[in-house]
Amino acid sequence: MTLEQIIDLLQTNKNFNKNISHWQTFPAKEARYVDFPSSLDRRLANTLGEKGITQLYTHQADAVRTVSEGRDVVVVTPTASGKTLCYNLPVLNEILENPDARSLYLFPTKALSQDQLAELHDLVDKLDVDIKTFTYDGDTPHTARRLIRSAGHIVVSNPDMLHAGILPHHTKWIKLFENLRFVVIDEVHYYRGVFGSHMANVIKRLRRICKFYGSNPQFICCSATIANPDELAGRIIGRRPVLIDNNGAPSGEKHFLMYNPPVVNPQLGIRKSAVKEAARLAKSFLRQKIQTIVFAHYRLYVEVLLTYLQRELKGDFDQGIKVAGYRGGYLPHERRRIERGLRSGEITGVVSTNALELGIDIGSLDVSIIVGYPGTIASLWQQSGRAGRMSSISLTIMVANSSAINQFLCGEPKYIFQRTPESGIIDPDNLIIKTNHLKCAAFELPFDEEEYADDIGSGKILDYLASENVLHRTGDRYHWSSDIYPAQQVSLRSASPDNFVILNRSNNSEVIGEVDYFSAPIFLHPDAIYLHGARQYQVTELDWDGKKAYVKEVDTDYYTDAETKTDLKVLRVEDEEATSDDSRKHWGEVTLTCTTVLFKKIKFETHENVGSGELKMPELEMHTNGFWYSFPGDIAYRLEIAGAQFGGSLRGLANVLGKIAPLWVMCDSRDLRSISHVRAPFTERPTVYIYENIPGGVGLSEKLYSQSDKLFEACRQHVRTCPCPSGCPACVGPPMEVGDDGKNGVIKLLDYMLALVPV
């Protein structure tokens, strides 16, 4: 049965359609072509002709022309629209005209680098010209590095390697920096938050070194659809690029369904498991050998879904149906094998985190199933775009879960289909990040007074570093004087550069995967069931100091899920304002202390709790920013909320604010967390906090502070219209968490915050 036939059946299936909260159909679009620009080298045009490309899409031609005029660009078009040619053509064109020209390609992941390198090699081979193209990353053999530094026309790398392996050793890269014509930055939308703030500082260091060697490269950036691509790219590269968004690529007919599983407990507002419903839907497509990708928000969900699908389809494997998992923590050779299997069609289905959201070539998939709102509208469209990559009909199904933000979107689909995707927010002037990169920059080249004359903040930081003997000041110059190598001390992606390696004791301590520092207490605590490729391993030992976890192979009917306890302290108030009556809202710097305190054993299929255990894990600390609202001390009395109920109502308020807030500041839902205190240590009042789950913060708290009334009104409307009687996961949280009258208490608190009740 074809996908088109299945879609026709679904449209007439009453049982299926009663769970569809919205069905959006996007008609097919024809390609819009333009002749090759006159500036394109004839050899390049002939090679494209041999590949069957006789014209360019409109956005490709616009990009090539604008770059030829000497301007920076950012190309913003959907997935699989041919953005690669937007930078390969100008780069190859320049090298054909000037063999001394050099280019640097930056991709956020090694996998994407390898993928794009293969496409570039194919084009270069067909050109039959000596254009040397190399990958330079942590996996590059030391024997090849000298050749790459001296002879590479195009160096393909990633921000981490540029930061720690190229810029600090610029004297070995003189040929590159003296002749650098282009810097390509792909997947610009990926550089948000902490990573993007670091990236802007790395590019600032790159431009500084280029200036020292007498070059001034153009920047060619590519991005998925976000609200501010030219602004974000501009903040990263240090100057505003030309926006190219005249998409001329064709697209097939696309169906986008929002599927809301049926309610199984009306009193508690609990719906059927989104994970199990997604597995059921995916199975129906896979059995018809329709290539399907399932996206899950968390690595645990990926492994649980993979387990279900492999068990259900076990008898179908002989018919050529194969399902694989894909996520961070899998070893590189494992991920490459899965990517090849998807391209060749050997693998019928894949269950992935957002790791396959980026533009890695995995061939033509037909169906994308998204388990729960992925956190941003941009991510939602990226994941949806993984289906229908060859102009064929495609289907996306977002399977909602019971959480507030998912139910809010099911009731208000306009937030997905009519609202602009999120802005990319970064803060390059974050004190910690900026200080670290000024150290790295001083190691690379001494600072002159003219470099920081217009930036008082940098001057103060340099003076401080000199007072700490990290730098040595001579006249108006700052020189590096410390013994340490600063770039090694700075991780671009997290607060800690350390990963935990997982060793399988059942197979001679073979390395089977890795987990980041902050996730280790959650997934690798003693007695945890670590899931990898739908196989189960029990953690027998966690060596915290050695950053190793030892596991053994087991066969259990349950998996584990850990819970953490978070304590919050206010360090500094940046701004505050009196609101209704005696309440105040604030934003400022906070510190979080997180400890994993217990784990639950969750039975496969039924998802019931079949056991638990206490844990004593190391405390992890993070400094960040937060927004908080403090009530008068007697608010419970004023609003007639019973004392025993007040704590639950405050928790419910924190729950709904934390779940809906990401839509208002347009960020990933994982970037914000919320907590409540009946009597907060700092304010000594009932207080709710929303804090940035990002070391150092990136400005989301300040944005919440300025838009708080809109957020409060949206939360009030959502809670009031929820059909549950006393609270549920779709609004404020279940009664067992917020109390029997939690919902009513939350409405009273929100009415007070919006000055809708007399006090």
Image (tube, rainbow, N blue to C red):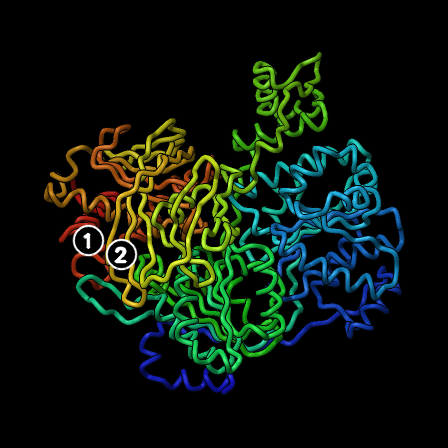
Q: Secondary structure at mark 2?
A: loop
Name the disc covering residue 743, or none. 1
Q: Is residue 501 above or below residue 453?
A: below
Percent position of residue 644, x then y:
11, 43
Compare residues 355 and 531 and report the one nearer the observer. 531
Given the current orientation, which residue lies at the most extreme top position?
Answer: 475
Percent position of residue 38, x then y:
85, 63
**Image quarter hosting the C terminus:** top left
In 3D space, how far apart are the residues under numbered discs 1 and 2 (Cα atoms)? 8 Å
Q: Is residue 458 above or below residue 191?
A: above
Q: Horizontally, is 16 left or right of 477 in the view?
A: left
Is residue 732 visible in the rendered image? The answer is: yes
Percent position of residue 700, x then y:
44, 42
Label 1 sits on what residue type? Lys
Q: Is residue 515 above or below residue 727?
A: above
For disc 2, the marked residue is: 731
Precedes in sequence: disc 1 or disc 2: 2
Q: Residues within 10 Å of mark 1 (few under 14, many from 20)?
A: many
Compare residues 124 and 189 and report the one nearer the observer. 124
Q: Residues within 10 Å of mark 2 (few under 14, many from 20)?
A: many
Q: Horizontally, is 231 left or right of 105 in the view?
A: left
Residue name at image x 58 percent, y 74 percent: 346
Percent position of residue 480, x then y:
67, 21
Is residue 72 visible in the rendered image? The answer is: no
Residue name at image x 43 percent, y 74 percent: 282
Q: Are marks 1 and 2 in contact (CB under 8 Å)?
A: yes
Label 2 sits on what residue type? Cys
Residue name at image x 24 percent, y 45 percent: 651
Q: Secondary structure at mark 1?
A: helix
Name the disc covering residue 255, or none. none
